[in-house]
Amino acid sequence: MSEPPHPDAQRLALFASLLATAQESLRGFVRGIVGSVEQAQDITQDVFVDAWRATTRGQAPFDGTGDEQALRRWLFHVAYQRAVSTLRHRAVLRVESLDSDLPLEPSQLYEPAPFEDRIAEGEALQAALDALDPQDAACLLFSAAQGFTTSEIATILEISPAAAKKRLTRAKQRLRAAYFARQTQEAIGRHRREAQ
């Protein structure tokens, strides 16, 4: 069995730099899609194993011809593919309330939130993100958290720029609807607990 070729010093330095600068943002992106810290760490490690293999083989964009943005797009594309694959293999059970929606009191909308409520709000936002289709969640995370442009998102997802723009707009609308639906459900629960 032959040894894989060893990358030159320039490609090794590029890989080490990429690992140092992109690892946390990549893990955060994957966590936003899969919702699990442990799975995000596993997927991120797998992505960097794939990147290392590409580096040792001299494959594009790790062949020395790719710029830093091309490398980041490659990493996020592979991470997206692995995250979606993980979600496809996961059994998802969704629980929805059968209770009717009660309107929010105007005073509940303007009161400053205590610390516990801010934590709950963060959890509500994560739950709303989890309720989105993985492709919609990925578009939002690519744009808001990673700063990719619509054309870069299109490249990563292998879709047209118009489709990426449309998907991003739709994802924002769905996130907003899921977030406010969750907030309404929590307010109903608080209202019922206070009434008891």
Image (cartoon, rainbow, N blue to C red):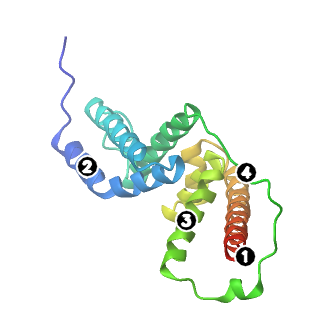
Q: Position of residue 138 (x, y in %)?
A: 57, 51
Along the polypeptide, which appears first: circle 1 or circle 2?
A: 2
Label 3 near label 1: C-beta < 8 Å? no
Q: Is residue 70 left or right of residue 192?
A: left
Count of residue discs: 4
Q: Position of residue 190 (x, y in %)?
A: 67, 72
Residue that carries the numbered disc 2 in the rendered image: 14
Residue 123 quadrant: bottom right
Residue that carries the numbered disc 3 in the rendered image: 144
Residue 158 quadrant: top right
Q: Is residue 96 above or below residue 54?
A: below
Q: Is residue 49 above or below residue 134?
A: above
In the image, farthest residue toward the top? 1
Distance from label 1 to label 2 (Cα)? 61 Å
Residue drawn at (81%, 70%) of the image: 102
Along the polypeptide, which appears first: circle 4 or circle 3?
A: 4
- Given this view, does label 4 or label 2 mark the residue nearer the observer? 4
| SS state under label 4 | loop
Along the polypeptide, which appears first: circle 4 or circle 2?
A: 2
Amino acid at dot 4:
Glu
Quadrant into which the N terminus falls = top left
Residue that carries the numbered disc 4 in the rendered image: 96
Badge 4, how many Cα within 10 Å: few under 14, some, many 20+?
few
Residue that carries the numbered disc 1 in the rendered image: 195
Amino acid at dot 2:
Leu
Badge 2, how many Cα within 10 Å: few under 14, some, many 20+?
some
Quadrant into which the C terminus falls = bottom right
Amino acid at dot 1:
Ala
Distance from label 4 to label 1 (Cα)? 22 Å
Along the polypeptide, which appears first: circle 1 or circle 3?
A: 3
Along the polypeptide, which appears first: circle 4 or circle 1?
A: 4
Distance from label 4 to label 3 (Cα)? 28 Å
